[in-house]
Image: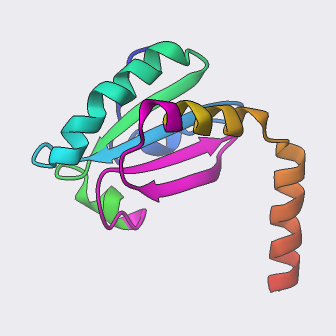
Amino acid sequence: MAVIELTADTFNDAVLPGQTVIVDFWAPWCGPCRSFAPTFEAASAKHADVVFAKVNTEVEQQLAGELNIRSIPTLMVFREQILLFNQAGALSAGQLDALLQQVAELDMDAVRAEIAEQEASAS
């Protein structure tokens, strides 16, 4: 699957129910971002069941600010509209594959129950 570019206008529409979405926040001037790009592209070909997306933080500064992106590259992984992973720094191909495997194996009913429990205790 091809990597898609997201903007402030398309971000929420890309994080859809029933899908796993991995987003790479990057900038053209960022050396580690450019080094990570081929790994991200290769993973997108390998994991056809995952939506791979990129956000150019230079162009989408407001979106990056709203999502508290403080350094790049930063990866976020959503599954069923729930943010499961948010970490700055590039991953190796093996780390990226392992992350996507862990996300795929999660029991989302248990994740939703844990979120509900946390929200209830915070109230």
60 relative to 121, above or below = above
73 relative to 35, above or below = below
Q: Please provide percent x and percent y for residue 43.
A: 45, 23
Q: Please provide percent x and percent y for residue 66.
A: 39, 65
71 relative to 11, above or below = below
**Left or right: residue 107 compared with residue 83:** right
Q: Please provide percent x and percent y for residue 74.
A: 38, 53
**Residue 121 in view:** yes
Q: Please provide percent x and percent y for residue 9.
A: 37, 44
Residue at 80% over, 64% down = 115
Q: Which quadrant is the C terminus positioned in?
A: bottom right
**Residue lying furthest left:** 29
Span colored in magenta: 66-95
Instruction: Give the image's coloring scheme.
Output: rainbow
Please tell me in which quadrant of the rendered image residue 101 appears. Answer: top right
Residue at 56% over, 39% down = 15
Q: Does the magenta stretch include residue 73?
A: yes
**Residue 27 in view:** no
119 relative to 18, above or below = below
**Left or right: residue 107 compared with residue 35:** right
**Left or right: residue 111 compared with residue 102:** right
